[in-house]
Image (cartoon, grey):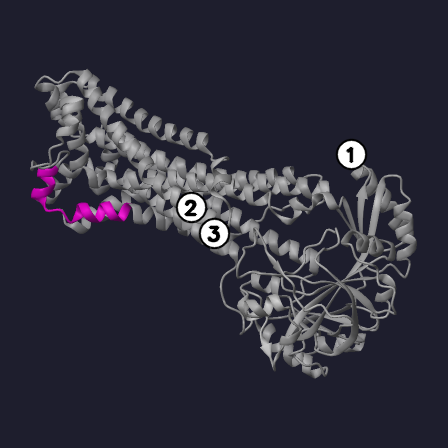
Amino acid sequence: MWKAYAGSAVRNNRAAAAAIVVAVFIAATLISTITAIFYNLWTDNIRRIVLGEGDWQGRLISAFTEEDARRAEETPGVAQAVLEEAGPGRQAMLIRFENPRAVYSELPLLAESFGLSSADETRVQYHTELLIQYYIYSPEQQKQPPLLLSFYVCVMLVVCFSLVLMIYNAFDVSMNARIHQLGILQSVGATPGQIRTALLEEALALSLVPLLAGIAAGVGLNILFVRAANAISTGMGTVPTEFDYSLWVFLAGFAVCLITVGVSAWVPARRLSRMTPLEAIRGGDSLPVKKVRSFRLLSKHFGIEGELARKSLYTRRKAFRTATVSLTLSFLVFGVFLNFMTLSDISTQLTYFERYKDRWDLLAAVEDTQGREDALLGEIRALPEATGCTAYRKATAYTQLTEDMLSPELRALGGLEALKDTGITAQNGSYQIKVPIVVLDDASFEEYCAQAGITAPAGAPPSAVTVNQIWDSAHSHFRERAYLPYINPREGQSLKLYDSSGNAAASLDIAAYTDKTPELREEYDDFALLQIMPENAWQQLAPELEADTVYFNIKAVSEDQITPAEAAVTRVLDTAGVDFTMENRQAEAVYNVAARKALNIFMGILCGLLALIGIANVFSNILGHIGQRKREFARYQSIGMTPESVNKVLLMETLIIGLRPILLSLPLNVLFVIFSVTASKLKLTMFIGRMPLLPLLAAAAAVLAAVGLAYLIGGRIICRANIADTLRDDTLF
């Protein structure tokens, strides 16, 4: 009996059934697409980490032998142990465990079996970046999910909320059309449980096929997304993205879809099943008569039609609430996305890369020059495609500074404790300060000294030029940094250097002080004491501080000669037989543009789908409720209302429903912009000049057009309907 009733209800309410099918299909497609995209982003992250660094979970560094590796593999819980070179006389033992989640408990034990201290981070290391992808954390780490998972959960919550509203409206319209019928069934003995079960079974029957079809469509869209991403990144030297899918992804998407559809159908089914027979029979397709607020302003300016429109929406405000929320959310998300991308573009122009892109064209990193860096430098400088080249190394040491060594300006401010986020604390009356060392080739060092207006040190090495400045983070922000002298300049001053383990490494004489840094493709720590020294001085420190990689910072003759210069430098390094990596400023810029384009496309598609959900939600809601109001308009027409007056009422409702979400979301967008500009330390005038006004106006016009189209279709159906037949009809449309 219930099956026959459900079939009859679907046949008599084809518009409502079609709305449910379309809503479920859209929901399943969107959920499946988002789930598959984020799964592929996750697997792609893991793949790139493994390709770049390997799939090891823990690493031990010492003078290991192959016998040590075999011994490690025989240890219970160890799946694999492989050796690789880690410097002169040292090997890195790369270890994979049978149970990766035990790495933080088993690796220290394995290290101690080889006589290594588990607290020595230079010798006992964890593949933290890879482990976090699998949600494996050390006891000291804050156990928070990776950013990608957090973003996925946030996106899915917003999407599911919007989808619930859309599908709920479709089910609500379909079920409300039969309140009168359900009341009659209750009066002849149908129980609330039977009615609820019948409605849910009907919902499941209508939803199952479009749900599966939507999941399949989502997989297809994800394949297209992967291909588009690979097409955008073609020619950039990046590893192509591979499409991944698994049974677990399908089950996750199916479960989320089923829950979303189930919640959407359960709420109206439960509400209708709890109505008394008298309420249902009386409610039918119209509202009970009650006193309603008068809207004299509308009646004064827009006549009786304006009054009727506002009263109708007021009495049905609960029914239209979900549609308003959905459309407001869609327009809000779209506006936030546009404003966010605009602010992001402004911030990108202020990055280090953009500010210093004219200081380099190519950067070749040679892992081991085999003592031929001078010869390689000479060959690169002799290339006709290159106008200049600087060879440099980077090393990191530490030093201890006492309070009296700080500059008077810094002490007057309150010392290092007065600055924000330095990570520096006093220990036993002194501060441990990071000391980055940049080693320039001798000719480049002399050129740097001339540019800084200081005399190149001629004393006995090792000596260096100290970049004597520290960011005053207490009185300036990262967009507009103000600097103070770091230490008090004194003639003949020296620094005692320590390695990362705290072992004394060397003593470094300070030959001169400056506030200028070399023009390299480098960004330096705001709270470190930077040292610049020539290659001849570095040779005195080389045994104590490691800096095997030599960087060749190359300027091309012109912009169109960057690619030929890269080919020429590559030939030089290949002929020398050294291992190197090459960075091209033009390629980096193209990659950054492509990455932003891909992000814009992805977020644009997401926002577009959310907007589509909101519009579809409102569209189905309006059509459904107009269908339920056929008798209402038939009564108006029976007492003399003309089709023109009907259209005027519908026009007023269009403006009210369409403008409300726009007006509600605009203040929220303004607050978002103000907050983002303030947090980013940007000037509001910079944003105003690039405000995405036209896209926002286009989105607002699309909202009004969608609402207007729904009312136009509904109005034509109402005006063409026979008044007598409409008053007798008990079906939707």
Image position of 506 with respect to 333: above or below: below
Residue hosting label 2: 674
Q: From the viewer's perspective, is 491 left or right of 687?
A: right
Residues drawn in magenta? 265-283
Decide which of 579, 58 is in the foreground and name it. Answer: 579
Residue hosting label 1: 560
Disc 3 + disc 1, Cβ < 8 Å = no
Q: From the viewer's perspective, is 14 left or right of 675?
A: left
Can residue 713 be seen by looking at this rendering? yes
Provide residue 724's location: percent of width, then percent of height.
11, 20
Q: From the viewer's perspective, is 342 left or right of 61?
A: left
Q: Amino acid at mark 1?
A: Asp
The residues tagged by marks 3 and 1 sit, at their Cα atoms, a distance apart of: 39 Å
Secondary structure category for the residue under label 3: helix
Q: Amino acid at mark 3?
A: Ala
**Marker count (numbered):** 3
Provide residue 480's location: percent of width, then percent of height.
57, 51
Label 2 Cα crowd, 10 Å radius (few <14 / some 14-19 / many 20+): some
The residues tagged by marks 2 and 1 sit, at their Cα atoms, a distance apart of: 41 Å
Secondary structure category for the residue under label 1: helix
Answer whether residue 268 is magenta in the image: yes
Decide which of 371, 162 is in the foreground and name it. Answer: 371
Quadrant of residue 366 within the rendered picture = bottom right
The residues tagged by marks 3 and 2 sit, at their Cα atoms, a distance apart of: 9 Å
Provide residue 674's location: percent of width, then percent of height.
42, 46
Provide residue 329's location: percent of width, then percent of height.
36, 42
Residue hosting label 3: 679
Q: Residue at x 83, y 41 (%)?
A: 565
Q: Quadrant of the N terminus?
A: top left
Q: Main secondary structure of the magenta part?
A: helix
Image position of 452 with respect to 272: above or below: below
Q: Earlier in the sequence, mark 3 or mark 1?
A: 1
